[in-house]
Image: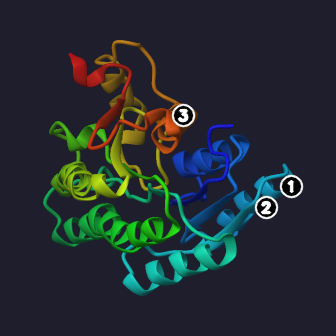
Amino acid sequence: MRMKDKVALVTGAASGMGAATVRLFAREGARAVVVADVLDSDGEAVAEEIRKAGGAASYVHLDVTKEDQWQAAIDRTVAAHGGLNVLVNNAGISGSATEDLYDTALWHRLMDINSTGVFLGMKYGIPAIRRTGGPGSVINLSSISGIVGQSYIHVGYNASKGAVRLITKAAAAQHGKEGIRVNSVHPGLMPPMRTSGRTADPEQRAKTLKGVPLGRAGEVDEVANAILFLASDESSYVTGAELVVDGGWTAV
């Protein structure tokens, strides 16, 4: 039970990789998981599913761009579950749903959700982990788009995910002495997100798939397994690392 005695908050947990992660954490014996999202009915359903399976779960509404909502979500987590040990900053939006790769409004939205959301999560989550005591772990979801450029995605997506990559390294350097590890996960070709555009197009996905050495798209559970490793004590000497889950796409 790799999450025994741990309380974890996961953003963007109403669907996709976030939902897969909270379900896996619960199966791995987490003391409690907090499902955080703006999709209230879907998030409540995920938490209820976990409770029916015998796990401890609660839902909290959280717009990751809102500082007051972060403070409230962390306060509710600590009040309900006695502390916080693991924070997974997973919430994000795609940059492939526009033809205008320099759309200014989308630039700001991508940076607000994908980058500032991670910054605010660490601003409020890390002090809570520190107060809880013992080792803690923060996992920030970046992307292969945070490592390489792409011709068909809004530049703000690459920029926002690249920012997550370096925010993670900075936080790892700053908080290592406190026993708080901070790592990033970089998924490759996955099932389309709710906000996907061209990356959900079968023709574009087929082109991308040709560059994947393993010859297939990934599954959200495979990303959840990577997140679990970084959340668990199995990765106790891993911080500031980039865990790429892309079937080898960035290796060629």
Distance between the alpha carbons at the discs numbered 3 and 1: 22 Å
160 lies left or right of 76: left
Quadrant of the snapshot with the C terminus: top left
Q: Which residue is mark 3?
A: 225
- Number of residue marks: 3
47 lies left or right of 35: right
Callout 1 touching callout 2 (CB < 8 Å)? yes
Q: Three-letter amino acid code at disc 1?
A: Lys
Q: Which residue is mark 2?
A: 48
Viewer-nearest of discs 3 and 2: 3
Q: Earlier in the sequence, mark 3 or mark 2?
A: 2
Q: Earlier in the sequence, mark 3 or mark 1?
A: 1
Distance between the alpha carbons at the discs numbered 3 and 2: 22 Å
Q: Position of residue 177 (x, y in %)?
A: 29, 54
Q: Secondary structure at mark 2?
A: helix
Q: Residue at x 18, y 51 (%)?
A: 166
Q: Examine the rendered structure and indicate whether residue 94 appears above or below residue 143.
A: below
Dot 3 crowding, Cα within 10 Å, few <14, some 14–19, many 20+: some
Q: Three-letter amino acid code at disc 3?
A: Asn
- 215 or 59, nearer to the observer: 59
- Looking at the rendered structure, which numbered label has been put on residue 87? none
Q: Examine the rendered structure and indicate whether residue 91 appears above or below residue 53.
A: below
Location of residue 81 by image quarter: bottom right
Quadrant of the snapshot with the N terminus: top right
Q: Residue at x 70, y 56 (%)?
A: 31
154 lies left or right of 29: left
Q: Position of residue 139 (x, y in %)?
A: 41, 50
Q: Which residue is mark 1?
A: 52
Distance between the alpha carbons at the discs numbered 1 and 2: 6 Å
